[in-house]
Structure formats: structure tokens, C-alpha cells
């Protein structure tokens, strides 16, 4: 496992990093879960910037400023609603890759990811964690930035799963 990968248990909105990733929906106009928490903490200017982006396709990502957040940027990505079909895994993987590509393009050195799709979108948490960790670890093999990637776990089940996979 790349030693630039870290685990943090808690609320992603408190992190003082260059960018936090938002598990958004296709409209990019806010929602519940981590998306709601990010918009509440960032303030209404975030929604104003998001309105200009014309939404985002599933598996893709778009960047905005972080406004009142300690993080300088928010990278909004849209995970798949879990369907049990094969394309779910490809779309979830693409969320991590596109977010990391956008981070690299913007010189972002520290980035924090929530557990995309594992809330309202119902992706099985163990499978989602494996995809998240493997995708980030593979990306880091041929990229020198970001210099730090934090997986943020909010619920007990994800905490247990990530701890096992990262320490194993
Ligand atoms: P999705 O629609 O992609 O499933 P959710 O926001 O419903 O997005 O859930 C994604 C993950 O974010 C879940 O694992 C949930 O526990 C977690 N989560 C919810 N609030 C926060 C928060 N404030 N900080 C970090 N993670 C959060």
C-alpha cells in the first residue's frame, strides 16, 4: 500500500486539505448525506458556482472552490446508484480516477475522499472500499501528486472495512 494513503474517521468538512471530494448527484445542486454536509459548511456561494456547471455525468467529476470550508477546493463526483450490474464497478472506479486527474491538473497536493456511493446509493461497502483503495493505490504508482490521500470513513461499518484493508 502506498504510504501516501491515510485513514480519517469523522466529518470530511473539517479537514484542512487542498481538496475534499463530494459524493454528489447528477444535478450538482445539493442533496443529503455528505453532499448536504459539504454545502452547509461551504455556504451558499458553493451552490451558486455549482449552478454554472450544468451537472455532471455519473463517473465524472468537476471542481469548484471551497468557500467557507477549510479545504481550498471541492471536487464533485457522481457515483453510480448500485444496480448489481457489471458497469457499477467501472463507474465507481472512474469517480476516483477522474477526481485524482482533476486534482493533479490543479496542483492539489492533499485530497480527502468520502466513501462514494455507499450511502443513499447503496453500493455494498466492502466492494466499494476495495475498488476505492485499489484504484487510488494504482494511480499513485505512476503519479507523484497528490502527496497525501485521506480516506474519510463516517460510519462504523466503513471504518472497520477500511481499517482491515489498509492494515492487511
Ligand atoms: P451516495 O449518494 O454517494 O451514497 P451519501 O452521502 O449518501 O452518498 O453517502 C456516502 C458516504 O458518505 C456514506 O458512507 C456516509 O456514511 C458518508 N458520510 C455522510 N456524511 C458524511 C460527512 N459529513 N463526512 C464524511 N462522510 C460522510
Image: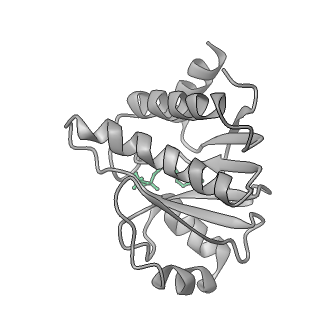
Residue at x 34%, y 39% (from the top left corner) = 90
Q: Nearer the viewer, residue 153 or 151?
A: 151
Relative to 84, 28 lies left or right: right
Residue occupying the point 51% across, 33% down: 135
Residue 159 image offset from top left, x and y in percent: 58, 32
Residue at 57%, 65% (x, y): give it.
37
Give left or right: position of 134 versus 150. left
Is residue 64 placed above or below 106 in the rendered structure?
below
Q: How many marks?
A: 0
Left or right position of 56 against 132: left
| Colouring chosen for the image of the structure | one colour
Where residue 5 sits, quadrant-wise, is: top right
As drawn, 62 above or below 163: below
What is the quadrant of residue 164 in the picture? top right
Residue 82 at x, y percent in the picture:
27, 44
Residue 118 showing in the rendered view: no
Tell me residue 45's x, y (percent): 62, 85
Of residues 134 and 160, the one nearer the viewer is 134
Query: Can residue 22 be seen from the camera position used here?
Result: yes
User: In the rendered image, which quarter contains the N terminus?
Assistant: top right
Position of the C terminus, as image quadrant, is: top right
The image quadrant of residue 154 is: top right
Q: Is residue 103 left or right of residue 53?
A: right
Indicate the position of residue 10 as horizontal and vertical percent values.
Answer: 67, 47
Given the current orientation, which residue lies at the most extreme top position?
A: 168
Amino acid at each position: 500500500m502506498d504510504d501516501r494513503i491515510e485513514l480519517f474517521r469523522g466529518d470530511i468538512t473539517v479537514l484542512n486539505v487542498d481538496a475534499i471530494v463530494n459524493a454528489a448527484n447528477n444535478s450538482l445542486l445539493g442533496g443529503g448525506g455528505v453532499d448536504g454536509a459539504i454545502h452547509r459548511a461551504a455556504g451558499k456561494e458553493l451552490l451558486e458556482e455549482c449552478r454554472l456547471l450544468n451537472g455532471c455525468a455519473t463517473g465524472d467529476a468537476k471542481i469548484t472552490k471551497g468557500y467557507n470550508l477549510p479545504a481550498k477546493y471541492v471536487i464533485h463526483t457522481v457515483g453510480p446508484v448500485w444496480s448489481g450490474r457489471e458497469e457499477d464497478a467501472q463507474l465507481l472506479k472512474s469517480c476516483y480516477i477522474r477526481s485524482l486527474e482533476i486534482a493533479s491538473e490543479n496542483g492539489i497536493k492533499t485530497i480527502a475522499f468520502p466513501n462514494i456511493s455507499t450511502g443513499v446509493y447503496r453500493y455494498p461497502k466492502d466492494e466499494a472500499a476495495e475498488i476505492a483503495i485499489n484504484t487510488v493505490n494504482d494511480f499513485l504508482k505512476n503519479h507523484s501528486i497528490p502527496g497525501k490521500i485521506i480516506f474519510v470513513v463516517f460510519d462504523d461499518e466503513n471504518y472497520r472495512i477500511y481499517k482491515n484493508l489498509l492494515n492487511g
